Amino acid sequence: MKKELITDFTRRISQCNRSGLIVIMYDIFFACLSEAREAYEKEAWEEYKESLRKAQRILDELISALDFSYDLARELYQIYVFCRDRLAIALYKRNNEETDTAERLMRKLYDGFAHAAEQDQSKPLMSNTQQVYAGYTYGRGELVETCQDSDTSRGFFA
């Protein structure tokens, strides 16, 4: 994954709440599938395998985040396992159609989670992080983000 994308995901994770974290995990999943497609087109099979394995690990994280006290979790579990199986088939058969099937299902779920995350007004998961301000200044062709430290002691307190 490109360094810029990793930095963006890291910043988003530091500022998000619980439902936002699920949306970010979906975004990482889609980024892994995108990398897998690029590797497939270049016939870089090791990169292809690694990208699909990363996507499978994201699905494993989504499965572990399910709360089975709700009926919806059982349905999501079945979908996640189905998608993980599609990626396993794609991994060993080098077949991009299987990744397309998994992505279509996950995109449908993503829309629902993104809508729910927009309505979630809970506090961010991380409380002692830098505050990021975007949009105050613009660079040539891009948005500039500024991090301001109001408190120089961040991290864990012993």
Image (tube, helix red, strand yellow):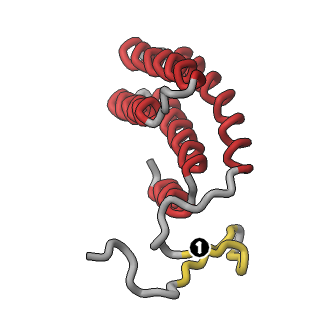
Q: Quadrant of the C terminus?
A: bottom left
Q: Position of residue 110 (x, y in %)?
A: 65, 35
- Left or right of 93 on screen, residue 77: right
Q: Position of residue 101 (x, y in %)?
A: 59, 17
Amino acid tagged 1 = Val
For this orientation, the residue located farthest to the left is 158
Residue 145 higher or lower than 76, as above or below? below
Residue 150 higher or lower than 17, as above or below? below
Residue 105: quarter of image: top right
Q: Can see residue 96?
A: no
Secondary structure found at label 1: strand
Label 1, residues with CA under 10 Å away: few <14, some 14-19, many ≥20? some
Residue 65 higher or lower than 6, as above or below? above
- Left or right of 5 on screen, residue 155: left
Q: Residue at x 68, y 57 (%)?
A: 121
Q: Can see residue 25?
A: yes
**Looking at the image, which is closer to me, 32 or 59?**
59
Q: Position of residue 5 (x, y in %)?
A: 51, 54
**Looking at the image, which is closer to me, 12 or 37?**
12
Residue 93: quarter of image: top left
- Left or right of 9 on screen, residue 23: right
Residue carrying label 1: 132
Q: Residue at x 44, y 47 (%)?
A: 1
For this orientation, the residue located farthest to the front is 69
Q: Position of residue 135 (x, y in %)?
A: 72, 74
Q: Residue at x 57, y 58 (%)?
A: 16
